[in-house]
Image: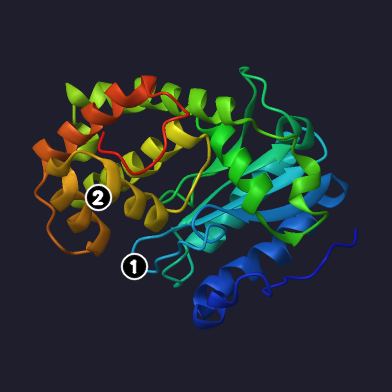
Amino acid sequence: MSYTPLDLRGFEKLAGLPDVKAILEELMTAVPPILGSQFIGLYLYGSLALDDFNPRRSDIDFVVVTADALADEAVAALAAMHAGIAASDSRWAIELEGAYIPLAAMRRHKPSQARHPHIDRGHNEQLRVKQLDVDWVIQRYVLREHGLTLAGPPIRDLIDPVSADDLRQATQDILQTWWRPMLTDPKYLDSAGYRVYAVLTMCRMLYTLRFGDVVSKPAGVKWALGVVNGRFTSLIQQADIWQNGMPFNKLDETLDFIGYTLEAGDWRPETKPGSNL
């Protein structure tokens, strides 16, 4: 099976990230032979696609599109391949976040019990078969509008349009199913890194709720600083400059910001930026 070679022209920033490029080239070399005729393409999304990559805290988001659901033998071979990557000495070996998605599931989102092979950041030795998360609507949008094609046809050709209302609804669903429970059980906010992630994510979610679009973390932060209640200004600014190893003892403030974002779920989409919320 033939496929296009790794093409870095769309994101010159990888020229200064040789280890990231090496991991991507390893995937490019290993995945197509394992999948054979099932392989359609390999794509990047997330921070690399949104021009938001920070080597101090970002991961590498990828998706492999397959012709159909994979047989157990193929899943086992992929699991062995990812275990090999995890055993390497690359610092990015456990920073891969990706999934192997059949074309039909990529084309249009239909909530179902369908399960697909998935690699979670920090667990690259364990390829797990699981259901797509509620945020898949948003990830499909990012892939379609901003995704980087490493192999295969353009990703935009493989995904139906995602509407602004679909993005808003998905954001509200994520807020209710994942973030609201943290107000009473903040166990996932124990680490400074996850608290920072929560603050920056709330900025982006507020933007999506208002405009039905998805922006990078820096763009979300810049916009939020101009419109959200002033009591969150310092929290957002500190989260924006945080790096691994730095303290971020802001649990109460982070929970307050999550609650604020939850209350913003009924914002009127036509409201323009610039006024305090």
Residue 121 in percent (x, y) is at 43, 50
Mark nearest the camera among 2 and 1 is: 2
Q: Which mark is residue 230?
A: none
Amino acid at circle 1: Arg
Q: Which residue is mark 2?
A: 196
What is the secondary structure assignment of the residue under circle 2?
helix
The reply, left or right, for residue 56 in relation to residue 129 is: left
Q: Which residue is mark 1?
A: 56
Image marks 2 and 1: residues in contact by CB distance under 8 Å: no
Note whether residue 23 is visible: yes
Residue 212 in percent (x, y) is at 52, 34
Earlier in the chain: of badge 2 and badge 1, it is: 1
Q: CA distance from mark 2 to mark 1?
A: 13 Å
Name the residue at 19% across, 33% down: 187
Rendered position, 133 above or below 42: above
Name the residue at 85% across, 62% down: 3
